[in-house]
Image (tube, helix red, strand yellow):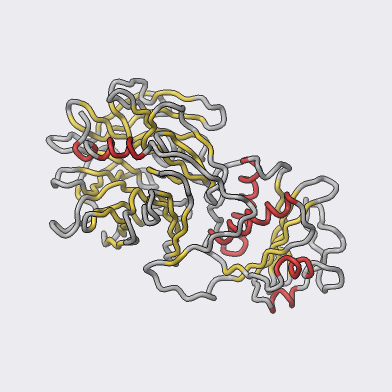
Protein backbone atom coordinates (compact mmCIF):
# COMPACT_ATOMS: atom_id res chain seq x y z
CA UNK A 1 0.00 0.00 0.00
CA UNK A 2 1.39 3.41 -0.93
CA UNK A 3 1.12 5.85 2.00
CA UNK A 4 -1.42 8.67 1.92
CA UNK A 5 1.25 11.35 1.74
CA UNK A 6 2.63 9.59 -1.36
CA UNK A 7 -0.56 8.68 -3.19
CA UNK A 8 -0.45 11.80 -5.31
CA UNK A 9 3.13 12.91 -4.71
CA UNK A 10 4.99 9.82 -6.00
CA UNK A 11 3.07 9.81 -9.26
CA UNK A 12 3.75 13.50 -9.67
CA UNK A 13 7.41 12.91 -8.89
CA UNK A 14 7.63 10.06 -11.37
CA UNK A 15 6.07 12.25 -14.03
CA UNK A 16 8.35 15.15 -13.17
CA UNK A 17 11.39 12.93 -13.48
CA UNK A 18 10.75 12.44 -17.20
CA UNK A 19 12.16 15.79 -18.38
CA UNK A 20 15.72 15.89 -19.79
CA UNK A 21 18.85 17.00 -20.10
CA UNK A 22 21.81 18.78 -19.10
CA UNK A 23 24.40 21.36 -19.64
CA UNK A 24 27.60 21.37 -17.69
CA UNK A 25 29.13 24.54 -16.36
CA UNK A 26 32.24 25.62 -18.25
CA UNK A 27 35.34 26.07 -16.10
CA UNK A 28 36.26 29.37 -17.69
CA UNK A 29 32.88 31.03 -17.09
CA UNK A 30 32.96 33.66 -14.30
CA UNK A 31 31.28 32.70 -11.03
CA UNK A 32 27.61 33.58 -10.57
CA UNK A 33 27.60 35.97 -7.65
CA UNK A 34 24.10 34.95 -6.57
CA UNK A 35 21.57 37.10 -4.74
CA UNK A 36 20.75 37.63 -1.10
CA UNK A 37 17.31 37.15 0.43
CA UNK A 38 15.64 37.84 3.71
CA UNK A 39 18.75 38.61 5.76
CA UNK A 40 20.48 41.94 6.31
CA UNK A 41 24.19 41.63 5.62
CA UNK A 42 26.93 44.25 5.91
CA UNK A 43 29.73 43.69 3.37
CA UNK A 44 33.33 44.25 4.29
CA UNK A 45 33.30 42.11 7.44
CA UNK A 46 34.73 39.05 5.73
CA UNK A 47 38.42 38.68 4.79
CA UNK A 48 39.44 39.90 1.36
CA UNK A 49 41.05 37.33 -0.96
CA UNK A 50 43.03 38.07 -4.09
CA UNK A 51 43.58 35.23 -6.59
CA UNK A 52 46.69 35.95 -8.64
CA UNK A 53 47.42 35.24 -12.27
CA UNK A 54 50.71 34.60 -13.98
CA UNK A 55 51.60 32.20 -16.76
CA UNK A 56 48.47 31.47 -18.81
CA UNK A 57 47.80 27.92 -19.96
CA UNK A 58 44.49 26.16 -20.45
CA UNK A 59 45.08 24.01 -17.37
CA UNK A 60 46.09 26.90 -15.12
CA UNK A 61 43.27 29.17 -16.30
CA UNK A 62 40.69 26.42 -15.74
CA UNK A 63 42.17 25.57 -12.33
CA UNK A 64 42.05 29.23 -11.29
CA UNK A 65 38.44 29.46 -12.50
CA UNK A 66 37.44 26.45 -10.36
CA UNK A 67 39.28 27.91 -7.36
CA UNK A 68 37.65 31.32 -7.83
CA UNK A 69 34.18 29.78 -7.99
CA UNK A 70 34.85 27.64 -4.94
CA UNK A 71 36.03 30.59 -2.86
CA UNK A 72 33.08 32.67 -3.99
CA UNK A 73 30.59 29.89 -3.28
CA UNK A 74 32.07 29.33 0.21
CA UNK A 75 30.44 32.63 1.25
CA UNK A 76 33.39 33.29 3.57
CA UNK A 77 35.26 36.00 1.61
CA UNK A 78 35.10 39.24 -0.28
CA UNK A 79 36.78 38.35 -3.58
CA UNK A 80 38.87 41.22 -4.93
CA UNK A 81 38.35 42.07 -8.58
CA UNK A 82 41.34 43.77 -10.16
CA UNK A 83 40.55 46.85 -12.25
CA UNK A 84 43.19 45.83 -14.78
CA UNK A 85 41.91 42.27 -15.08
CA UNK A 86 44.43 39.57 -15.93
CA UNK A 87 47.05 42.03 -17.10
CA UNK A 88 47.25 43.62 -13.64
CA UNK A 89 47.20 40.18 -12.04
CA UNK A 90 50.23 39.21 -14.09
CA UNK A 91 51.90 42.50 -13.16
CA UNK A 92 51.55 41.66 -9.48
CA UNK A 93 53.81 38.67 -10.07
CA UNK A 94 56.52 40.44 -12.03
CA UNK A 95 60.19 40.71 -10.99
CA UNK A 96 61.31 43.48 -8.69
CA UNK A 97 58.54 43.39 -6.11
CA UNK A 98 59.68 43.18 -2.52
CA UNK A 99 59.14 40.13 -0.37
CA UNK A 100 60.20 36.50 0.05
CA UNK A 101 59.97 33.85 -2.61
CA UNK A 102 57.24 31.25 -2.05
CA UNK A 103 58.95 28.10 -0.82
CA UNK A 104 57.65 25.41 1.54
CA UNK A 105 58.85 22.04 2.77
CA UNK A 106 57.85 19.19 0.52
CA UNK A 107 56.66 21.33 -2.41
CA UNK A 108 58.81 22.52 -5.27
CA UNK A 109 59.18 26.29 -5.30
CA UNK A 110 57.43 28.51 -7.80
CA UNK A 111 59.49 30.01 -10.63
CA UNK A 112 62.38 32.11 -9.35
CA UNK A 113 61.16 35.27 -11.08
CA UNK A 114 58.05 35.30 -8.83
CA UNK A 115 58.24 37.77 -5.94
CA UNK A 116 55.56 38.87 -3.50
CA UNK A 117 54.45 42.47 -2.98
CA UNK A 118 52.57 42.37 0.32
CA UNK A 119 52.10 46.17 0.61
CA UNK A 120 50.43 46.26 -2.82
CA UNK A 121 48.14 43.33 -1.97
CA UNK A 122 47.16 45.09 1.27
CA UNK A 123 46.47 48.32 -0.60
CA UNK A 124 44.07 46.38 -2.82
CA UNK A 125 42.20 45.24 0.29
CA UNK A 126 43.51 41.68 0.47
CA UNK A 127 43.92 39.84 3.74
CA UNK A 128 45.03 36.73 1.83
CA UNK A 129 46.37 36.10 -1.65
CA UNK A 130 46.42 32.84 -3.57
CA UNK A 131 48.68 32.09 -6.52
CA UNK A 132 47.98 29.10 -8.75
CA UNK A 133 51.02 28.00 -10.73
CA UNK A 134 52.48 24.99 -12.51
CA UNK A 135 55.87 23.42 -11.99
CA UNK A 136 57.53 23.29 -15.41
CA UNK A 137 59.63 20.28 -14.40
CA UNK A 138 56.99 17.99 -12.92
CA UNK A 139 53.91 19.44 -14.61
CA UNK A 140 52.06 19.49 -11.28
CA UNK A 141 49.72 22.35 -10.40
CA UNK A 142 50.18 24.00 -6.99
CA UNK A 143 48.65 26.83 -4.99
CA UNK A 144 50.49 29.13 -2.59
CA UNK A 145 48.45 30.89 0.12
CA UNK A 146 49.91 34.17 1.42
CA UNK A 147 48.96 35.88 4.68
CA UNK A 148 49.16 39.49 3.52
CA UNK A 149 49.06 41.17 6.92
CA UNK A 150 51.55 38.71 8.40
CA UNK A 151 53.68 38.90 5.23
CA UNK A 152 54.24 35.19 5.22
CA UNK A 153 53.31 32.02 3.35
CA UNK A 154 50.61 30.10 5.18
CA UNK A 155 50.29 26.99 2.99
CA UNK A 156 51.65 25.36 -0.15
CA UNK A 157 49.12 23.00 -1.69
CA UNK A 158 49.61 20.66 -4.61
CA UNK A 159 47.20 19.05 -7.07
CA UNK A 160 47.88 15.60 -8.56
CA UNK A 161 48.52 15.65 -12.29
CA UNK A 162 45.48 15.37 -14.52
CA UNK A 163 43.18 17.23 -16.88
CA UNK A 164 40.35 19.56 -15.99
CA UNK A 165 37.83 17.21 -17.65
CA UNK A 166 38.80 14.45 -15.21
CA UNK A 167 36.38 14.41 -12.22
CA UNK A 168 39.20 13.22 -9.95
CA UNK A 169 41.35 16.23 -10.93
CA UNK A 170 38.45 18.62 -10.37
CA UNK A 171 37.83 17.08 -6.96
CA UNK A 172 41.52 17.53 -6.11
CA UNK A 173 41.21 21.23 -6.97
CA UNK A 174 38.09 21.43 -4.79
CA UNK A 175 40.11 19.98 -1.90
CA UNK A 176 42.75 22.67 -2.41
CA UNK A 177 39.96 25.29 -2.33
CA UNK A 178 38.68 23.87 0.95
CA UNK A 179 42.15 24.09 2.47
CA UNK A 180 42.42 27.73 1.39
CA UNK A 181 39.13 28.31 3.22
CA UNK A 182 40.54 26.51 6.28
CA UNK A 183 43.64 28.74 6.29
CA UNK A 184 41.64 31.96 6.04
CA UNK A 185 38.45 31.10 7.94
CA UNK A 186 39.52 28.43 10.43
CA UNK A 187 37.28 25.63 9.13
CA UNK A 188 37.41 23.82 5.80
CA UNK A 189 35.09 24.66 2.93
CA UNK A 190 32.62 22.25 1.34
CA UNK A 191 33.73 22.32 -2.30
CA UNK A 192 35.06 18.74 -2.03
CA UNK A 193 31.52 17.43 -1.60
CA UNK A 194 28.85 16.44 -4.09
CA UNK A 195 25.11 16.48 -4.51
CA UNK A 196 23.10 13.50 -5.72
CA UNK A 197 19.63 14.13 -7.14
CA UNK A 198 16.96 12.69 -9.40
CA UNK A 199 16.37 13.81 -12.97
CA UNK A 200 13.99 11.96 -15.30
CA UNK A 201 13.91 9.01 -12.92
CA UNK A 202 17.68 8.59 -12.85
CA UNK A 203 20.09 9.45 -10.04
CA UNK A 204 22.94 11.83 -10.90
CA UNK A 205 25.83 13.22 -8.92
CA UNK A 206 27.22 16.71 -9.49
CA UNK A 207 29.95 18.95 -8.09
CA UNK A 208 28.80 21.99 -6.13
CA UNK A 209 29.71 24.33 -8.97
CA UNK A 210 27.25 22.50 -11.25
CA UNK A 211 29.96 20.71 -13.24
CA UNK A 212 31.02 17.07 -13.63
CA UNK A 213 27.46 15.71 -13.63
CA UNK A 214 27.40 11.92 -14.00
CA UNK A 215 24.61 9.30 -13.81
CA UNK A 216 24.93 6.80 -10.98
CA UNK A 217 21.76 4.67 -11.25
CA UNK A 218 20.66 2.27 -13.97
CA UNK A 219 19.27 3.65 -17.20
CA UNK A 220 15.64 2.74 -17.89
CA UNK A 221 14.74 2.30 -14.21
CA UNK A 222 13.03 4.82 -11.91
CA UNK A 223 15.24 5.89 -9.01
CA UNK A 224 13.93 7.69 -5.92
CA UNK A 225 15.16 9.13 -2.60
CA UNK A 226 18.98 8.90 -2.93
CA UNK A 227 21.19 9.25 0.14
CA UNK A 228 24.92 9.28 0.90
CA UNK A 229 26.92 7.01 3.15
CA UNK A 230 29.28 8.94 5.47
CA UNK A 231 32.54 9.35 3.56
CA UNK A 232 30.85 9.66 0.15
CA UNK A 233 32.03 6.33 -1.29
CA UNK A 234 28.61 4.67 -1.40
CA UNK A 235 25.02 5.80 -1.73
CA UNK A 236 21.56 4.28 -1.45
CA UNK A 237 18.50 4.81 -3.60
CA UNK A 238 15.15 3.18 -4.27
CA UNK A 239 14.50 1.59 -7.65
CA UNK A 240 10.75 1.81 -8.23
CA UNK A 241 9.32 -1.09 -10.25
CA UNK A 242 5.78 -2.48 -10.55
CA UNK A 243 4.58 -1.04 -7.24
CA UNK A 244 7.63 -2.32 -5.38
CA UNK A 245 10.77 -0.45 -4.44
CA UNK A 246 13.90 -2.25 -3.33
CA UNK A 247 16.73 -0.19 -1.86
CA UNK A 248 20.14 -0.58 -3.49
CA UNK A 249 23.46 0.20 -1.85
CA UNK A 250 25.95 1.22 -4.56
CA UNK A 251 29.73 1.54 -4.38
CA UNK A 252 30.56 4.55 -6.57
CA UNK A 253 34.16 3.41 -7.06
CA UNK A 254 33.55 -0.19 -8.17
CA UNK A 255 29.97 0.18 -9.44
CA UNK A 256 28.89 -2.84 -7.40
CA UNK A 257 25.49 -2.74 -5.74
CA UNK A 258 23.40 -4.94 -3.46
CA UNK A 259 19.89 -5.06 -2.02
CA UNK A 260 19.41 -3.82 1.54
CA UNK A 261 17.51 -5.47 3.12
CA UNK A 262 17.92 -8.46 0.75
CA UNK A 263 14.27 -8.49 -0.39
CA UNK A 264 12.31 -6.64 -3.05
CA UNK A 265 8.71 -7.47 -2.20
CA UNK A 266 7.94 -4.13 -0.49
CA UNK A 267 8.15 -0.43 -1.31
CA UNK A 268 11.19 0.77 0.66
CA UNK A 269 12.31 4.39 0.32
CA UNK A 270 13.69 7.54 2.05
CA UNK A 271 16.72 5.62 3.36
CA UNK A 272 19.17 7.38 5.68
CA UNK A 273 22.48 6.22 7.18
CA UNK A 274 23.34 6.42 10.84
CA UNK A 275 26.36 8.67 11.53
CA UNK A 276 28.70 5.65 11.81
CA UNK A 277 27.34 4.13 8.59
CA UNK A 278 26.47 0.85 10.33
CA UNK A 279 22.68 1.23 10.31
CA UNK A 280 20.19 2.15 7.63
CA UNK A 281 16.82 3.68 8.57
CA UNK A 282 14.10 3.72 5.91
CA UNK A 283 10.35 3.76 5.28
CA UNK A 284 8.47 0.63 4.25
CA UNK A 285 4.98 0.60 2.74
CA UNK A 286 2.95 -2.61 2.81
CA UNK A 287 -0.63 -3.71 3.38
CA UNK A 288 -0.10 -2.86 7.05
CA UNK A 289 0.69 0.80 6.30
CA UNK A 290 3.90 2.80 6.18
CA UNK A 291 6.42 2.65 9.01
CA UNK A 292 10.05 3.38 9.85
CA UNK A 293 12.46 0.44 10.02
CA UNK A 294 16.17 0.04 10.65
CA UNK A 295 18.58 -2.53 9.20
CA UNK A 296 22.05 -3.43 10.44
CA UNK A 297 24.36 -3.01 7.45
CA UNK A 298 27.46 -4.09 9.35
CA UNK A 299 25.94 -7.52 10.13
CA UNK A 300 23.64 -7.61 7.09
CA UNK A 301 20.73 -8.62 9.32
CA UNK A 302 18.37 -7.64 12.06
CA UNK A 303 15.46 -5.75 10.53
CA UNK A 304 13.71 -3.74 13.26
CA UNK A 305 10.36 -1.95 13.06
CA UNK A 306 10.38 1.34 14.99
CA UNK A 307 6.85 2.68 14.42
CA UNK A 308 3.41 1.07 14.27
CA UNK A 309 1.11 3.06 12.01
CA UNK A 310 -2.33 2.47 13.55
CA UNK A 311 -4.12 4.45 10.84
CA UNK A 312 -1.19 6.79 10.21
CA UNK A 313 1.91 6.76 8.02
CA UNK A 314 5.49 7.20 9.29
CA UNK A 315 8.35 7.94 6.91
CA UNK A 316 11.44 10.03 6.01
CA UNK A 317 13.74 9.18 8.95
CA UNK A 318 16.89 11.21 9.66
CA UNK A 319 19.46 10.46 12.38
CA UNK A 320 20.79 13.03 14.82
CA UNK A 321 24.59 13.40 14.53
CA UNK A 322 25.15 11.45 17.74
CA UNK A 323 22.98 8.60 16.43
CA UNK A 324 20.73 8.63 19.49
CA UNK A 325 17.56 10.11 17.98
CA UNK A 326 15.61 9.92 14.72
CA UNK A 327 13.38 12.67 13.37
CA UNK A 328 10.68 11.51 10.97
CA UNK A 329 7.35 12.43 9.36
CA UNK A 330 4.07 11.13 10.75
CA UNK A 331 0.47 11.70 9.69
CA UNK A 332 -0.90 10.93 13.17
CA UNK A 333 -2.02 14.60 13.68
CA UNK A 334 -3.90 14.43 10.35
CA UNK A 335 -1.54 16.28 8.04
CA UNK A 336 2.10 15.12 7.93
CA UNK A 337 4.23 16.74 10.64
CA UNK A 338 7.76 16.31 12.05
CA UNK A 339 8.12 13.87 14.97
CA UNK A 340 11.13 12.58 16.91
CA UNK A 341 11.96 9.33 18.72
CA UNK A 342 14.90 7.53 20.26
CA UNK A 343 16.94 5.40 17.85
CA UNK A 344 15.24 2.28 19.24
CA UNK A 345 11.75 3.69 18.53
CA UNK A 346 10.83 4.71 22.06
CA UNK A 347 9.65 8.14 23.22
CA UNK A 348 7.85 9.23 20.04
CA UNK A 349 6.58 12.81 20.21
CA UNK A 350 5.81 15.84 18.08
CA UNK A 351 9.06 17.65 17.29
CA UNK A 352 8.39 20.75 15.18
CA UNK A 353 5.45 22.82 16.51
CA UNK A 354 2.78 23.95 14.07
CA UNK A 355 -0.46 25.98 14.10
CA UNK A 356 -3.63 24.26 12.97
CA UNK A 357 -5.13 26.18 10.08
CA UNK A 358 -2.14 28.51 9.73
CA UNK A 359 0.40 26.15 8.15
CA UNK A 360 0.00 22.86 6.31
CA UNK A 361 1.99 19.67 5.87
CA UNK A 362 5.60 19.40 7.05
CA UNK A 363 7.91 16.98 5.23
CA UNK A 364 11.49 15.95 4.43
CA UNK A 365 13.30 16.62 7.74
CA UNK A 366 17.08 16.52 7.89
CA UNK A 367 19.21 16.98 10.99
CA UNK A 368 22.06 19.51 10.79
CA UNK A 369 25.65 18.23 11.17
CA UNK A 370 26.07 19.93 14.55
CA UNK A 371 22.76 18.56 15.87
CA UNK A 372 21.45 22.02 16.74
CA UNK A 373 18.89 22.37 13.95
CA UNK A 374 16.50 20.41 11.76
CA UNK A 375 15.59 21.62 8.27
CA UNK A 376 12.34 20.64 6.55
CA UNK A 377 9.73 22.04 4.19
CA UNK A 378 6.25 23.12 5.20
CA UNK A 379 3.23 24.22 3.19
CA UNK A 380 2.50 27.93 3.51
CA UNK A 381 -0.55 29.23 1.64
CA UNK A 382 -0.46 26.16 -0.58
CA UNK A 383 3.26 26.28 -1.45
CA UNK A 384 6.10 24.41 0.27
CA UNK A 385 8.77 26.60 1.86
CA UNK A 386 12.03 25.71 3.61
CA UNK A 387 12.10 26.06 7.40
CA UNK A 388 14.78 25.50 10.05
CA UNK A 389 13.95 24.55 13.63
CA UNK A 390 16.25 25.23 16.58
CA UNK A 391 16.31 21.90 18.42
CA UNK A 392 16.84 23.36 21.91
CA UNK A 393 14.04 25.94 21.81
CA UNK A 394 11.95 24.27 19.08
CA UNK A 395 11.46 27.66 17.45
CA UNK A 396 11.05 27.55 13.66
CA UNK A 397 11.96 30.17 11.09
CA UNK A 398 11.12 30.36 7.42
CA UNK A 399 14.06 30.68 4.99
CA UNK A 400 12.38 30.91 1.58
CA UNK A 401 9.35 32.59 0.06
CA UNK A 402 9.88 32.94 -3.71
CA UNK A 403 8.22 30.08 -5.62
CA UNK A 404 7.92 26.52 -4.33
CA UNK A 405 10.89 25.37 -2.22
CA UNK A 406 11.29 21.87 -0.83
CA UNK A 407 13.56 18.94 0.16
CA UNK A 408 16.34 20.79 2.03
CA UNK A 409 19.65 19.00 2.65
CA UNK A 410 22.57 20.20 4.77
CA UNK A 411 26.17 20.84 3.76
CA UNK A 412 28.73 19.31 6.16
CA UNK A 413 29.67 22.81 7.35
CA UNK A 414 26.15 23.40 8.70
CA UNK A 415 26.25 26.83 7.05
CA UNK A 416 24.60 25.96 3.74
CA UNK A 417 21.41 24.20 2.65
CA UNK A 418 20.61 22.86 -0.80
CA UNK A 419 16.96 22.65 -1.80
CA UNK A 420 14.70 22.36 -4.83
CA UNK A 421 13.01 25.53 -6.11
CA UNK A 422 10.92 26.42 -9.14
CA UNK A 423 11.56 30.17 -8.76
CA UNK A 424 12.99 30.34 -12.30
CA UNK A 425 10.16 28.32 -13.86
CA UNK A 426 11.42 24.74 -13.49
CA UNK A 427 12.55 22.74 -10.49
CA UNK A 428 16.27 23.23 -10.01
CA UNK A 429 18.70 22.80 -7.12
CA UNK A 430 19.64 25.96 -5.26
CA UNK A 431 21.93 26.61 -2.29
CA UNK A 432 21.38 29.15 0.48
CA UNK A 433 24.00 30.45 2.89
CA UNK A 434 22.34 30.75 6.29
CA UNK A 435 24.68 33.51 7.49
CA UNK A 436 24.16 35.97 4.65
CA UNK A 437 20.94 34.76 2.98
CA UNK A 438 22.69 34.52 -0.39
CA UNK A 439 21.14 31.97 -2.75
CA UNK A 440 22.61 30.54 -5.94
CA UNK A 441 21.50 28.08 -8.58
CA UNK A 442 23.42 24.82 -9.01
CA UNK A 443 21.62 22.87 -11.76
CA UNK A 444 20.30 24.14 -15.08
CA UNK A 445 18.64 21.06 -16.55
CA UNK A 446 15.09 19.98 -17.34
CA UNK A 447 14.04 19.16 -13.78
CA UNK A 448 15.91 18.24 -10.59
CA UNK A 449 14.39 16.58 -7.54
CA UNK A 450 15.23 15.07 -4.16
CA UNK A 451 18.82 16.30 -3.56
CA UNK A 452 21.14 14.86 -0.92
CA UNK A 453 24.44 16.48 0.11
CA UNK A 454 27.47 14.27 0.75
CA UNK A 455 30.08 14.66 3.43
CA UNK A 456 33.58 15.56 2.25
CA UNK A 457 34.85 13.13 -0.38
CA UNK A 458 38.03 11.41 0.78
CA UNK A 459 40.96 11.09 -1.71
Where, by quadrant of the figure, is residue 237 drawn? top left
The residue drawn where x is 59% and y is 57% is 69
Find residue 209 and report its horizontal and vertical position in percent: 54, 51
Please indicate, yes or no, whether residue 369 appears anywhere in the rendered image.
no
The residue drawn where x is 54% and y is 64% is 76
Above or below, 52 relative to 228:
below
Above or below, 304 relative to 346:
above
Please indicate, yes or no, whether residue 144 appears anywhere in the rendered image.
yes
Find residue 330 and report its horizontal and vertical position in percent: 21, 43
The one of 179 and 407 positioned closer to us in this rendering: 407
The one of 195 and 15 positioned closer to us in this rendering: 15
- Location of the C terminus by quadrant is top right
The residue drawn where x is 39% and y is 70% is 39
- Location of the N terminus by quadrant is top left
Instruction: Say left or right for 167 vs 360.
Output: right
Above or below, 350 relative to 205:
below
Count of numbered badges drawn on the protein: 0
The residue drawn where x is 68% and y is 52% is 63
Find residue 84 and report its horizontal and vertical position in percent: 71, 72
Amino acid sequence: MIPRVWRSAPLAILAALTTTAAARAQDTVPADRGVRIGITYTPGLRPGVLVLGGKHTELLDSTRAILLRDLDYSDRFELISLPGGDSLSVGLLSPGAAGPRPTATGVTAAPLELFVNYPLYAALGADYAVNVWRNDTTGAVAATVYDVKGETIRRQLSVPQGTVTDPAFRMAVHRVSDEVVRVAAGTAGVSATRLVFIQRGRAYRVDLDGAAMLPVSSEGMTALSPGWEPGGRRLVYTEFQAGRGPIYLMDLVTGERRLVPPTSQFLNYTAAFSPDGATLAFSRSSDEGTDVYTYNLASDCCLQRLTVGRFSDNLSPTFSPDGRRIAFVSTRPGLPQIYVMAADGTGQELFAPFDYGMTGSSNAPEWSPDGLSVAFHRDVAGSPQVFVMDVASRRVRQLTSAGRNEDPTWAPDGQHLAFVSDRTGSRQIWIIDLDTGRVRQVTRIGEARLPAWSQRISP
